[in-house]
Image: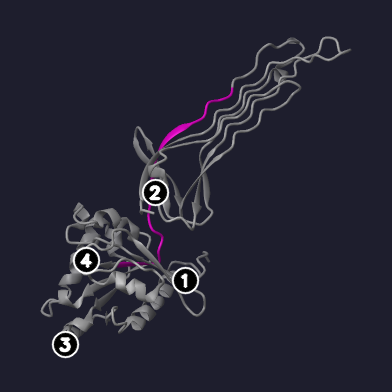
Amino acid sequence: MRFVDEAKIIIRSGSGGQGCVSFRREKYVPRGGPDGGDGGKGGDVVFRAVGNLLTLYDYRHAPIQEAESGRPGSGRLCYGRAGVDKVIEVPVGTQVFEETDDGEVLIADLTRDGQEIVVAEGGRGGKGNAHFKSSTMQVPRFAQPGEPGVEKYIRLELKVFADVGLLGLPNAGKSTFISRISAARPKIAAYPFTTLSPNLGVVIDENDRKLVVADIPGLIEGAHTGLGLGHTFLRHVERSRFLVHILSIEDVNPEDPLAGFHILDDELRQFDPELAEKPQMRVINKIDLADAERLAEVRAAFDRLGLRVYFMSALNEIGVDEVLSAMWELHLATVKDGGETEDGTVD
């Protein structure tokens, strides 16, 4: 199924049912009074986050989502049946925006599996004529109509919910790395933009703790202006606790070793300054392509700057365990600093 992280839909809650005008007609009961029942309430439109969904693809082909209207009341004080709610299931991490005359308004951010919110309430059912009987009105010949439902224009935006965001220029080896540390199997090839949508990998340690890693594709210089695929997918690192920035050793200049990292750091800063402030690990990949002299030269360049940089070959699985161990350490540190326990609950 194709990855879609944005969709526009129209939602309509159900209208309330019409109240009934009715009078008792029973043998041996003269002058039977009003007994019209109320109409049923219209169905609500509810958004629910579901953990096993990964895309908004379905709503590109179903742009109108409607709840059922309530049924009308009937005689003998019978109430109309309430309309069935329309439950719209979306991936965890979906934001729900309402489009109004004054612009978009964020009305829900669904960040937990099973989280629900009523976005459009159904109309109230109309009262039957039995409600209007009084000492001065013995024979009410009217009832209330049901209230109409609500129509809203909604934009859905999915932001991948991951602990770690993998960043890197095209062909830095992110897809190979995530395939080594998890069961994710992204497309891997020797040309740019093999990854066309975020890939999620789940790493589970010996204590059954989970680390969700997102491979964000398409970042190149100028991504914040829409070049490449980065502008489309940079939103998916906004929720990450920290970033792992992977650079191929082919793109490292020993005279200015941080130049390759600065390209994407600047893109993050221009897209969202808060992204640039996230904790970040720097990793040099593809060391199998460098001879011993070249590798020593690159290591020495980073040592002179006093920076902690990790070296690996994801293809040959050299240094991968060291990088993964450092990711776990940083993950546990950011969880602790964020005031949360390891199971994601707030202290």
Of labels 3 and 1, earlier in sequence is: 1
Q: Which residue is mark 4?
A: 170
Magenta stretch contains residue 160: yes
Q: Are marks 2 and 4 in contact (CB under 8 Å)?
A: no
Q: Which contiguous range is marked in magenta?
A: 146-166
Vertical arrangement, residue 65 with respect to residue 225, above or below: above
Query: Distance from label 2 to label 4 (Cα)?
Result: 26 Å
Quadrant hosting residue 100: top left
| Kind of residue at badge 3 | Asp
Ranked by sequence position, the earlier of labels 2 and 3 is: 2
Q: Earlier in the sequence, mark 3 or mark 4?
A: 4
Identify the mark nearer the N-term, 2 or 4.
Answer: 2
Measure how far apart labels 3 and 4 are at the Cα level: 23 Å
Q: Which residue is mark 2?
A: 57
Residue at the right extreme?
Answer: 28
Q: Secondary structure at mark 4?
A: loop
Q: Secondary structure at mark 3?
A: loop
How much space separates mark 3 and mark 1, taking CA atoms? 36 Å
**What is the number of the mark on residue 64?**
none
How far apart are the two marked residues, 4 and 1, measured between alpha carbons?
A: 27 Å
Question: On the image, numbered disc 3 is attached to which residue?
Answer: 291
Q: Closer to us: mark 2 or mark 4?
A: 2
Q: Residues within 10 Å of mark 1 (few under 14, many from 20)?
A: some
The front one of 245 and 75 is 75
Q: Which residue is mark 1?
A: 210
From the viewer's perspective, is 215 left or right of 23? left
Q: Position of residue 18 (x, y in %)?
A: 61, 22
Q: Quick check: 123 above or below 181?
A: above
